[in-house]
Image: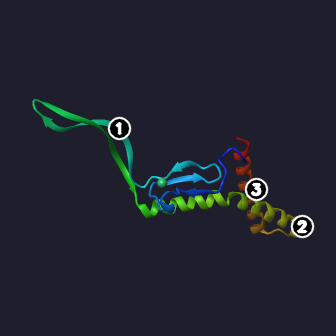
Amino acid sequence: MSKYLPTPYIKCGASDGKCPCGQIWSKPADTPIGEIIIGKWGDKHPAIRIKEPRGIGVVVEPYMEMIEYGEIPEEVAHATIDFILLACNMHDELVAGVRKLRSQLNEWYSHELWDDDDIEALKLADQLLAKVKEQDDD
Ligand SMILES: [Zn+2]
């Protein structure tokens, strides 16, 4: 459970949290963990362009060119950041809640009284807990 950087994760704190960079940070580790794309995205590659003619020569400058594939609107990007923060920061509590509900269901009913919804809920809980265990074992 401790292979990833510790939560809570937060938005970049620059400019009182209003920085538009899209970075997500681990607050306890005080380090960036990722960056959500805001705006245009695609493959970037170095290129050279002629800046200005100078005498019989020219001035060229390197720059990064992008082959654009799409664009993520700013509000969608920030909503995605919020979703990632919520999911990551609530992870441990959600897993603990599922474990508790699963054990409560076992205590409340004898297996003979389970209906299809109970069985489905247990299956979903077991699938989620198996995925968490798989991730923890990696
Ligand atoms: Zn920033």
Q: Earlier in the sequence, mark 1 or mark 2?
A: 1
* Pointer 2 local density, CA inside 10 Å: few below 14, some 14–19, many at least 20: few
Callouts 3 and 1 close, C-beta under 8 Å: no
Inter-mark Cα distance, 3 to 2: 18 Å
Which of 41/26 is in front? 26
Residue 110, labelled with which disc? 2
* Residue depicted at x 65% and y 59%: 89
Q: Amino acid at mark 1?
A: His
Q: Earlier in the sequence, mark 3 or mark 1?
A: 1
Inter-mark Cα distance, 3 to 1: 46 Å
* Residue depicted at x 71% and y 61%: 94
Q: Secondary structure at mark 3?
A: helix
Determine whether, in the image, residue 137 is placed left or right of residue 11.
Answer: right
In the rendered image, the quadrant that contains the C terminus is top right
Q: Earlier in the sequence, mark 3 or mark 2?
A: 2
Which of 134/75 is in front? 75
Inter-mark Cα distance, 1 to 2: 63 Å
Q: Amino acid at mark 2?
A: Ser
**Where does the image place residue 69, in percent across and percent down from the top left?**
37, 49
**Where does the image place residue 73, in percent across and percent down from the top left?**
40, 60
Say which of marks 1 and 2 sits in front: 1
* Pointer 3 local density, CA inside 10 Å: few below 14, some 14–19, many at least 20: some
Task: Tell me the residue that label 1 is attached to.
Answer: 45
